[in-house]
Image (cartoon, rainbow, N blue to C red):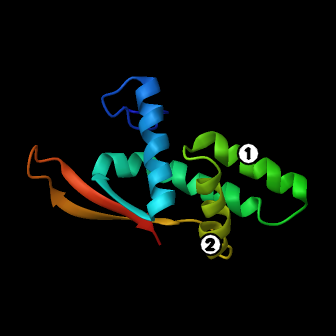
Amino acid sequence: MRHKVAGYKLGRTTAQRQGLRRSLVTELIDHGRIQTTETKCKAIRDQAEKLVTMAKGGLDGDVSKQVAARRLVARQVDGGVEVVRKLFTDIAPRYRERSGGYTRIYKLGPRKGDNAQMALIEWV
């Protein structure tokens, strides 16, 4: 039984796994869609959706809430100011009325080299 066990280990140490997730989420924000293995897509989906929710919370309200939300998001992504700006100005306003489910995963089939199941994750 897998009670109270969440997330995917992806065959990596904790630091490697955190770096991989951070870089994949950054690329998703930067490019809008990425193609990777199905397991990695499922691993980053929750983190990406939480970042959009944080960005939505930072759209309205006073300046201190906006700055706090930007700092929380910047802590979890690579790429600096440009990626955070894109999340807050382009992606989050699109989902202002949506309560969740900001990403979509398409299954693409097996990869030719090692037969790993590939998938495409993108914003809805």
| Front one among 85 and 111 | 85
Q: Earlier in the sequence, mark 2 or mark 1?
A: 1
Under circle 1, the secondary element is helix
Under circle 2, the secondary element is loop
Quarter of the image that includes the N terminus: top left
Q: Quadrant of residue 9?
A: top left
Percent from the top left, x then y, of residue 37?
Answer: 27, 49
* For discs 2 and 1, the disc positioned in front in the rendered view: 1
Q: CB atoms at circles 2 and 1 under 8 Å apart?
A: no
- In the picture provided, is 122 more to the left or to the right than 58? left
Q: Residue at x 65, y 45 (%)?
A: 74
Q: Which numbered disc covers residue 34?
A: none
Question: Badge 1: few (under 14), some or many (20 or more) residues near its Cα, within 10 Å?
Answer: few
CA distance for labels 2 and 1:
20 Å
Percent from the top left, x then y, of residue 117?
Answer: 19, 52
Residue 85, visible in the rendered structure: yes
| Front one among 97 and 69 | 69
Percent from the top left, x then y, of residue 3?
Answer: 45, 33
| Front one among 57 and 62 | 62
Q: Residue at x 43, y 47 (%)?
A: 24
Q: Which numbered disc covers residue 71?
A: 1
For the residue marked with disc 1, what is the amino acid?
A: Arg
Residue 5, visible in the rendered structure: no
Q: Residue at x 55, y 57 (%)?
A: 49
Q: Which numbered disc covers residue 95?
A: 2
For the residue marked with disc 2, what is the amino acid?
A: Tyr
- In the picture provided, is 36 more to the left or to the right than 20? left
Percent from the top left, x then y, of residue 101?
Answer: 52, 65
Task: Give above or below for 81 relative to 59.
Answer: above
Q: Residue at x 49, y 41 (%)?
A: 22
